[in-house]
Image (cartoon, rainbow, N blue to C red):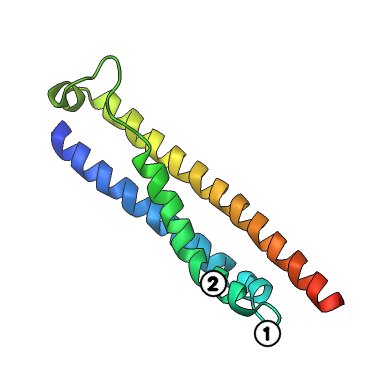
Amino acid sequence: MTNENYLYLSYFAAAAIGVLGAVATALVLRRRHREAAGGEAAGGLGRLLRRAFPAWLILAALLGFMSVTYFDCGHKTYPSIVGDRAHLVCKTQEQASEMAYYLAAALVAYGFVMMLSLCARARKSAR
């Protein structure tokens, strides 16, 4: 396999794996998330949060994927990037790492929003 073919294959495979990881995360958390954001007391915000959850995770994975650049001090042109297989492997690993990091950050941020939503719902029902 040539370096250029490896670049194409690894680039799209990394994106697909990141999106599949986000979808798998959404599926694993789906039931608990539906219980937390569901119910009549949640209203429109709960429905919005439930529907936005999978898209939020996919967007986070794709943002992590796109945050990695192949250009650096030693690789300023396309031929120099394609010519260095170790650089391609390193960038593919960096993309996987960044997608996982962005996915984790998205889950934490989304958990914080859910916590605020649940606190507001608890205060509303306590009145």
Q: Position of residue 91 (x, y in %)?
A: 33, 31
Q: Position of residue 53 (x, y in %)?
A: 52, 65
Q: Is 74 situated left or right of 125 in this image?
A: left
Residue located beneath label 1 in the image = 40
**Residue 78 relative to residue 26: left or right:** left
Of the residues shown, which amino acid type is indicated by label 1? Answer: Glu
Quarter occupied by residue 95: top left
Looking at this view, is 92 or 34 the one in front? 34
Residue pointed to by mark 2: 48
Residue type at numbered disc 2: Leu
Residue nearest the observer in this picture, 16 or 113? 113
Among all residues in the image, which is located at the extreme bottom?
40
User: Residue 92 vs residue 56: left or right?
Assistant: left
Residue 58 appears in the rendering: yes
As drawn, 77 above or below 52: above
Q: Secondary structure under badge 2? A: helix
**Residue 127 in the figure: left or right of residue 101:** right
Residue under the point 40% across and 58% down:
20
Q: Is residue 59 above or below residue 43?
A: above
